[in-house]
Amino acid sequence: MDIIELNCHVGVGPVVTGIALVTDDNFSARYDLDRIAGIFSRPQHKLAGQSYVDRIMVFNTAKGGVASAWMLHEMKSRGIAPKAILFNSVNPILAQGAALADMAMCDRFADGDVTQLIHSGDQVTVNPDIGLVTISRA
Amino acid sequence: MKLNLEEQAMLNGELGEPRRWAIEHMMRVGRFFDAPDFVEVTQAHIMADTESLGEAGVEFLEQIAAHSHNERQVRIPMITDPRGIDFCHYKRLKQTDLMASLEQRAIDAFEAMGILMTNTCINYQTIMPPVRGEHLAFGDTGVVIYCNSVLGAYSNFEGGPSSLAAGLTGRAPRYGLHLDQNRRATRRFRVDWEPRSLSDWGALGGIIGARSGSYWEVPVIEGITTQPGSDEMKHMGAAMASFGSVPLFHMVGITPEAPTLETVCDPCNLPAEVIEAAELEAFFARYGGKGEKLDVVVFSAPQLSLLEMQSLAELLDGNKLHPQTSLLAVTSPVVAADARRMGLVERIEGSGALVLEGMCFYQSYAREMGVANGWKRLMTNSVKLANIIGGYGYEPTLSNMENCVASAIAGEIV
């Protein structure tokens, strides 16, 4: 088992561990998801048809309007939500949404493009308080 | 973050639980974006449609509203973005009683907090336009980009929870566009052609937004000689924010922070990227549909100004919509009242169209409305709406207002 540590900016939310689902695509809670089924629903999205439930999601950046700030909270209240979301760079709306939902979120990785550094299927621990993401790779 | 005595008292819960939650929420966001402290804000504007709030969000608002009067009241003037329901017309739109009931609960909670139900995304045209240098906590990306760019105010995109926190505390974390150093241009676009219609202005915004592609980019535009008005800037800004998450642009000689190019950037170190006229054509061409049956025309996102309502009335005068095509004109309660008094609503609705007030099409359970009414092919002059609505299962066509009306009369895209 390889252990890889990635430093990022201090984020929000609790320490969580889960399995990564990674894309170099972007993310909008409003337009990309079927939030009832817990899957990516927009046909053009690179993760279309895949479940995001309990995953450590990794995207390039955030898209979409201010409504997303409520949606992470709504998704988490029903237990159909990711465990954490990591970005290369996030906009204020998603960060505000993660703060309300108490969902782990980090961005600005020191070692480069996080969508390349983490692979789908990796076990990942996110520690937003100190800006540290730990990958356990078989 | 550095807190003053009052902010520390809020954090200690001495001013009640709502303000304790609010300051703690903003500290989390401020820490994320390296805010050194808070900045006092003078107005807040909240986006909280019930489709995005859900049951959990409404319960969250009700919990705050359940506190004592003094603890739950907002401290600064605070207004609302469009709601998801026009109570006069929701049954005709085939929205459900459950949606209306959730909406009413949210309204009751807002009113208990002292929030004014303006229900508008054109508050900068109709309610209280900010002045240059005013720090704000505004929601709705179209509102924020307009107020930052056209009026020279200072606001980040504030999602509903953060707007509410700002309303309860009178503060916002000092990061992003509250800081002058983040308002300098980072991208420079040269346009050697003139936008003619509101949809042209929107398309230009969409092109620049897509090329910029980040909240942290600030485009400056040069080369346009046509004088834009408020509606032109409204459509361009809303589209730019929608396509690129961009919260601020400058237009040389037009917007207040850019009297010259040199004021907002060092032109020697920021080469111009040319936007060709052919890009405008290509932008419209991506939204096809010519000759297809048309289900619904929507004028919304942003809500129509009084002048747009007048233009629409003139185009519809003496005409009837095709029986298989609906036309929705969405505006603010203030504009609707004026338009009704001036006879514009009667003229628009005389064609079979419907004027809706205080809502916005895409924040109003658009997917469910589409399914219930059998709407698939949607036509609009709003670049923002055309960009968004595909995600709700519609097939959008983009054109100017004249073509949209002509198509609604013909029942197919002309």
Image (cartoon, coloured by chain):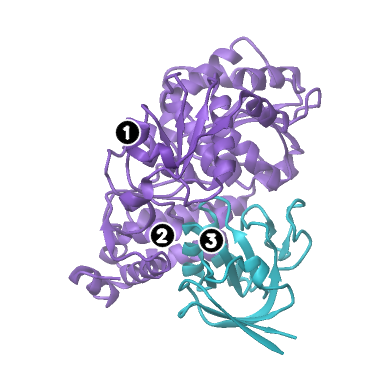
Chain colours: A cyan, B purple
Position of residue B294 measured from the top left corner of the image (x, y, whole percent): 75, 27
Q: Residues within 10 Å of mark 2 (few under 14, many from 20)?
A: many
Tags 1 and 2 both on a single chain: yes
Q: State the residue in front, B329 or B30.
A: B30
Q: Which mark is residue B402?
A: none
Q: Which mark is residue B162?
A: 2
Report the chain holding disc 3. A
In this orientation, does residue B127 appear? no
Position of residue B118 measured from the top left corner of the image (x, y, whole percent): 40, 42
The quadrant the C terminus of chain B occupies is: top right
The secondary structure type at the circle numbered 1 is: loop
Q: Residue furthest front?
A: B268
Q: In front of the other: label 2 or label 3?
A: 3
- Disc 3 designates what residue? A89
Q: Within the image, what quadrant is residue B144 found in? A: top left
The secondary structure type at the circle numbered 3 is: strand
In this orientation, does residue B214 appear? yes
Position of residue B150 measured from the top left corner of the image (x, y, whole percent): 37, 34
Which residue occupies 51% across, 70% down? Answer: A101
Is A22 rendered above or below residue B377? below
The secondary structure type at the circle numbered 2 is: helix
Q: State the residue in front, B81 or B286.
A: B286
Report the chain holding disc 2. B
Q: Which mark is residue B256?
A: 1
Looking at the rendered structure, the kind of residue marked 2 is Ser
Cα separation, mark 2 vs mark 3, equals 19 Å
Cα separation, mark 3 vs mark 1, equals 29 Å
